[in-house]
Image: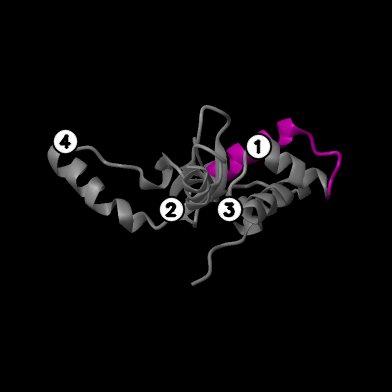
């Protein structure tokens, strides 16, 4: 079964399809992970008249519709990605690279927290910080 299109989701809510809505969703999908400012930059390559306020409002709507989700990968703005691509975020503290790991890696921790503390982990919002292989290799070469 295929997921409904943006147009179908909007119509089901009594909303109409607009070019900025389509462009913002496409930018999120192209970037993989993007802050509102990065998404705005991507959208402006196609539609220079779309302002950053429209991007923020559209991201909020797309999240309400369940098409995108956000996570906080640092103290800066949230990072958005497609909601159907749930994963754990791996963030390098040195270069800022964001990579992904399957959510199954967190299952034992989530199960233990649920059993021990009654706490349910939102695995899609998990971000683990450390050092990526490239930065780690570079640091070893300097030693």
Residue 13 placed where, x, y %?
A: 58, 48
Which residue corresponds to mark 1?
Answer: 36
Residue 78 placed where, x, y %?
A: 55, 35
Observer-side mark, 3 or 2, equals: 2
Residues under numbered marks 4 and 2 in contact, where contact means CB atoms less than 8 Å apart: no
In magenta, the rendered stretch is 46-63
Which residue corresponds to mark 2?
Answer: 87
Q: Nearer the viewer, residue 62 or 112?
A: 112
Q: Which is more N-terminal, label 2 or label 4?
A: 2
Which residue corresponds to mark 3?
Answer: 12
Which residue corresponds to mark 4?
Answer: 117
Q: Nearer the viewer, residue 17 or 91?
A: 91
Secondary structure mainly formed by the magenta segment: helix
Real-space CA distance between mark 1 and mark 3, rounded to the nearest whole angstrom: 26 Å
Real-space CA distance between mark 3 and mark 2, rounded to the nearest whole angstrom: 28 Å
Q: Is residue 118 on the magenta stretch?
A: no
What residue is at 49 percent from the left and 57 percent from the top?
Answer: 84
Real-space CA distance between mark 4 and mark 2, rounded to the nearest whole angstrom: 23 Å
Direction bottom: furthest residue: 1
Q: Which of the 4 quarters of the picture holds residue 40?
A: top right
Q: Nearer the viewer, residue 68 or 109?
A: 109
């Amino acid at each position: 079964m295929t997921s409904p299109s943006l147009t179908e989701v909007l119509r089901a809510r009594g909303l109409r399809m607009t070019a900025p809505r389509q462009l913002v969703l496409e930018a999120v999908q192209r970037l993989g992970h993007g802050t509102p400012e990065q998404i705005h930059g991507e959208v402006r390559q196609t539609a220079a008249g779309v302002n950053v306020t429209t991007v923020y409002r559209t991201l909020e709507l797309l999240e309400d519709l369940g098409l995108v989700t956000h996570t906080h990968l640092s103290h800066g703005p949230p990072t958005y990605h497609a909601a159907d691509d749930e994963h754990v975020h791996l963030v390098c503290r040195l270069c800022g690279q964001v990579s992904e790991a399957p959510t199954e890696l967190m299952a034992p921790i989530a199960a233990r927290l649920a059993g021990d503390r009654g706490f349910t982990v939102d695995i899609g919002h998990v971000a683990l910080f450390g050092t990526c292989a490239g930065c780690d290799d570079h640091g070893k070469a300097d030693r």
